[in-house]
Amino acid sequence: MGKRIIPQRRGRGNRYSVSGHRFKGIARHPNADSFTGEVASLKHDPGRTAPIAEIVGENEKYTMIAHDGMFVGQEIKVGQGAENDIGNTVYLGSIPEGTKIYNLELRPGDGGKMVRAAGEGATIASHGDKTTVRLPSRRFISLNKMCRATIGTVAGGGRIDKPKAKASKNFYAAKARNKIWPKVRGVAMNAVDHPHGSGRKQTVGISSSISRTAPPGRKVGNIAPKRTGRK
């Protein structure tokens, strides 16, 4: 009897899924229109690349991604009445051009979806009918002025400066975030393990293009490409 190839087994999840207990909190902007609190604690989150901070106010508390330079006892403001200071969460329409921001909302009230990795920061490019933001990838996007973002850059930017020194550290760091490491090339595998495997040479061949409706396990390489090769 045959067996499932590696991509098929990985697609099911189970032991390839990250454990939920590794995430120490849901880091998102509060739902309140106006909030004032202070940083109660800074925590290491094994499920993220950046540390998180617990913000405590009079009647509410929430968890946010820490910015570079955050400290316990720092005052944090959100929404209406918040100044354009580092650590405050404000509306995009009120942030001056050239300001660094992170944890950016794509739609007003979604809590923050982009620019959340350690050391990252987007930039306010211009204001018009919508606010244009330059992402860390250098791509520009236009967003509703009522979307919120936190001023500053994400903490933990120096995490890759120190070398791993040995393979086991990289393995467990990847495992904590459900990242497959090390990654073996499909052409280096046997035919039983990958559609690109086996053959006299390590080449993808004609199997680099695959239908979008292909079954799990066959879906590797270029998925439903409009074209392949050079013009």
Image (cartoon, helix red, strand yellow):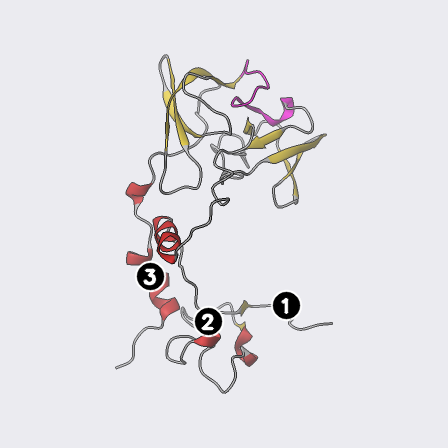
89 is within the stretch colored magenta: yes
Which of the image's four quarters has the C terminus? bottom right
Q: Identify the secondary structure beneath mark 3.
A: helix
Q: Is residue 96 left or right of residue 106?
A: right
- Mark 3 crowd level (few <14, some 14–19, many ≥20, 10 Å Cα): few
Q: CA distance from mark 3 to mark 1?
A: 28 Å
Q: Is residue 29 above or below residue 182?
A: above
| Disc on the earlier residue, 3 or 2 | 3
Q: Quadrant of residue 120?
A: top right
Main SS class of the magenta portion in the image: loop
Q: From the viewer's side, name the closer residue of 189 and 173.
A: 173
**Residue contact at pointers 3 and 1, CB within 8 angstroms:** no
The residue tagged 1 is: 226
Residue 66 visible from this viewpoint: yes
Q: Which mark is residue 214?
A: 2
State which region is magenta: 80-94
Residue at the spot of label 3: 12
Q: Residues within 10 Å of mark 1 (few under 14, many from 20)?
A: few
Horizontal side of residue 101 vs 219, given as left or right: right
N-terminal-most mark, 2 or 1: 2
Query: Looking at the image, do the residues carrying marks 2 and 1 touch, with CB atoms under 8 Å apart?
Result: no
Q: Is residue 151 magenta?
A: no
| Label 2 to label 1: alpha-carbon separation | 16 Å
Q: Is residue 92 left or right of residue 192?
A: right
Find residue 28 and report its horizontal and vertical position in percent: 44, 31
Amino acid marked by disc 2: Ala
Q: Percent position (x, y) of residue 162? A: 47, 45
Q: Residues within 10 Å of mark 2 (few under 14, many from 20)?
A: few
The tag earlier along the polypeptide, 3 or 1, is: 3
Is residue 103 depicted above or below 94 in this figure?
A: below
The residue depicted at 53 percent of the width and 30 percent of the height is 108
